[in-house]
Image (cartoon, rainbow, N blue to C red):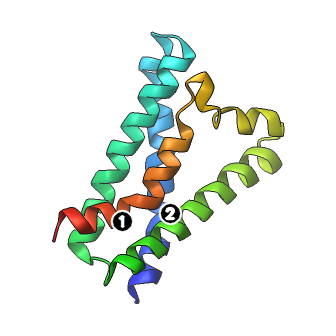
């Protein structure tokens, strides 16, 4: 299996990590604090959990180059956005306004930071583990 195929397939694992991170938020600390604070904590724990997963993937098979790491990140970013809007709108029937709400940095919403990490994580982990 090629490196790109392995990392593309591994996005499914990242999706599961994201879902479990959301379950943790809703089932635990999300009940104890305002929604915005729970969202922010969830974004940071998601970044942490994704980072650990990318590190493990890197130990199994690192990207062959910096450009390949960026390509992997771009694939993950596109898949994440497609899943978020496809599932959120067409399956969960959330209105577009609700889906775009988490992109509002000016309101303290940090989802864009998570997406930036999803894109950069393969490169960052590769550079840190030279």
Task: Name the residue at 48% across, 21% down.
Answer: 38
Quarter holding the C terminus? bottom left
Residue at horizontal 48 percent and vertical 45 percent from the top: 114
Q: Quarter holding the N terminus?
A: bottom left
Spatial CA distance of label 1 from label 2 is 15 Å
| Residue 94 appearing in the image | no
Residue linked to disc 1:
122
Residue 55 is situated, as x and y percent measured from the top left of the image, at: 25, 61
Q: Residue at x 64, y 38 (%)?
A: 103
Q: Are marks 1 and 2 in contact (CB under 8 Å)?
A: no
Q: Residue at x 49, y 42 (%)?
A: 113
Q: Which residue reaches farthest left?
A: 130
55 is higher (above) or lower (below) than 2: above
Image location of residue 72, percent across then percent down: 46, 72
Q: Which mark is residue 60?
A: none
The relative height of residue 34 versus residue 93 in the rendered view (above or below) is above
Residue at the bottom extreme of this rendering:
1
Residue 118 spot, x, y in % from top left: 46, 55
Helix, strand or loop at disc 2?
helix
Q: Which is more foreground, mark 1 or mark 2?
A: 1
């Amino acid at each position: 299996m090629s490196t790109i195929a392995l990392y593309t397939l591994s996005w499914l694992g990242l999706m599961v990590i994201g879902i479990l991170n959301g379950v943790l938020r809703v089932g635990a600390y999300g009940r104890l604090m305002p929604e915005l604070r729970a969202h922010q904590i969830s974004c940071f724990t998601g970044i942490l959990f994704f980072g650990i997963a990318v590190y493990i993937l890197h130990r199994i098979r690192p990207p062959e180059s910096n450009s390949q790491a960026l390509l992997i990140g771009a694939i993950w970013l596109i898949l994440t956005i497609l899943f978020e809007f496809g599932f959120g709108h067409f399956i969960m029937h959330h209105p577009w306004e609700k889906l775009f709400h988490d992109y509002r940095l000016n309101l303290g919403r940090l989802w864009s930071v998570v997406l930036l990490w999803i894109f950069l994580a393969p490169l960052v982990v590769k550079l840190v583990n030279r």
